[in-house]
């Protein structure tokens, strides 16, 4: 099987997912534009059924598997949003879902995953250790594994966001996408570059976890020590094996954003766009506010807001820090 999605895969995913997910709107954020220096458009996956884009990839993969393959259940590890997407897919298909989550997962993401009927296993270890645990449990119980960012059908599901952007904002100039494992940006970049190559695709990565940034400099996948960043959904120490070559092919630029500007992005979204976005989702706005991306006043920039699953008490604490 191919280890990358094609534009045909993404269009098939769009048709497969249409009855089950929300085609999220494109919203212009005029109040953010003076500080950003361009026309700002938001793609709020925060409004998705599970509060994040991950449902697209998880559900596309789950719907592509046979009943025999998922009969015993489906399993994965996640920082929280893939878990919720997979739990939703399992509930819809009436199968068991087991999610191995890091002990540092925000409580709201754990609670939401359990509320969807999934079994949650908290595990103290890095991404590689968690995936090792997942495959051990899967082998023992004959569960189907759905990887959060290495699977091409998961990437294809995420890529449907790119199709929607091009449909709803036909004259878009630039798209900014958060970078964690790389499945989201791989799918969106494929959809955009295979349809309209003139659109600039930029990846935004936390300055504390710059694995793709340094991999591009080193011209090879580069693993870095895992540092704490407020953007927990992007906290991964090594680039995905399958996303990496796609990103190198299609992503024009990778920028780093420090936690202070990620927080500023969260605040701007809540205050000026009336949208609650978790830190990982706010990184694109943070990059614009930091001035790390060169833009023009008439440039139409679409920022993908990946999710809004963050505790409101934590959001209040962040506001206290920056008041």
Image (tube, rainbow, N blue to C red):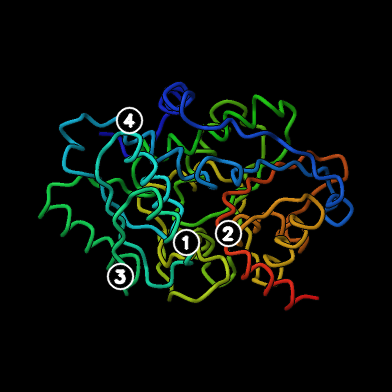
Residue at mark 2 to residue at mark 3: CA–CA distance: 21 Å
Q: Find disc 4 in the rendering and name its residue.
A: 63
Q: CA distance from mark 3 to mark 1?
A: 28 Å
Tell which tag, 4 or 2, sits nearer the viewer: 4
Q: Earlier in the sequence, mark 3 or mark 1?
A: 3
Image quarter of residue 237: bottom left
Q: Which mark is residue 215?
A: 1
Secondary structure, mark 4, is helix
Crowdedness of circle 4 by 10 Å Cα count: few (<14), some, many (20+)?
some
Q: Is residue 285 above or below residue 162?
A: below
Q: Residues within 10 Å of mark 1 (few under 14, many from 20)?
A: some
> Which of the two discs, 1 and 2, sits closer to the camera?
2
Q: Nearer the viewer, residue 159 or 130?
A: 130
Q: CA distance from mark 1 to mark 2?
A: 20 Å
- In the image, residue 119 sits, relative to residue 206, either above or below, namely above
Query: In this figure, which residue is indicated by the disc labeled 3?
Result: 123
Between marks 3 and 1 in the image, the one whose residue lies nearer the viewer: 3
Looking at marks 4 and 2 on the same chain, the residue that comes earlier in the sequence is marked by 4
Residue 238 location in percent, x, y? 40, 64
């Amino acid at each position: 099987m191919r280890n990358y999605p094609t534009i045909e895969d993404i269009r098939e995913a769009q048709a497969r997912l249409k009855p089950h997910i929300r085609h999220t709107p494109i919203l212009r954020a005029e109040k953010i534009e003076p500080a950003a220096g361009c026309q700002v458009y938001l793609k709020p996956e925060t409004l998705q059924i599970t509060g994040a884009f991950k449902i697209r990839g998880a559900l596309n993969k789950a719907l592509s598997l046979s009943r025999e393959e998922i009969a015993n259940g489906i399993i994965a590890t996640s920082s929280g949003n893939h878990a919720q997407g997979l739990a939703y897919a399992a509930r819809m298909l009436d199968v068991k879902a087991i999610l191995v989550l890091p002990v540092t997962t925000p409580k709201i993401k754990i609670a939401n995953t359990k509320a969807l009927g999934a079994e949650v296993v908290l595990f103290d270890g890095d991404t590689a250790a968690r995936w090792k645990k997942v495959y051990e449990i899967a082998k023992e119980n004959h569960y189907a594994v759905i990887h959060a960012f290495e699977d091409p059908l998961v990437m294809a599901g995420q890529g449907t966001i790119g199709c929607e952007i091009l449909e709803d904002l036909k004259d878009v100039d630039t798209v900014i996408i958060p970078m964690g494992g790389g499945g989201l940006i791989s799918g969106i970049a494929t959809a955009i570059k295979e349809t309209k190559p003139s659109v600039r695709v930029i990846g935004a990565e936390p300055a504390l976890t710059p694995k793709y940034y340094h991999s591009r400099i080193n011209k090879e996948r580069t693993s870095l020590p895992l540092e704490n960043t407020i953007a927990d959904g992007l906290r991964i120490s090594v680039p995905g094996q399958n996303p990496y070559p796609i990103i190198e092919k299609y992503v024009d630029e990778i920028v780093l954003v420090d936690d202070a500007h990620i927080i500023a992005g969260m605040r701007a979204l809540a205050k000026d766009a009336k949208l609650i976005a978790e830190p990982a989702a706010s990184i694109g706005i943070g990059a614009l506010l930091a001035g790390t991306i060169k833009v023009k006043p008439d440039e139409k920039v679409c920022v993908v807001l990946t999710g809004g699953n963050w505790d409101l008490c934590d959001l209040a604490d962040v506001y206290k820090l920056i008041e």
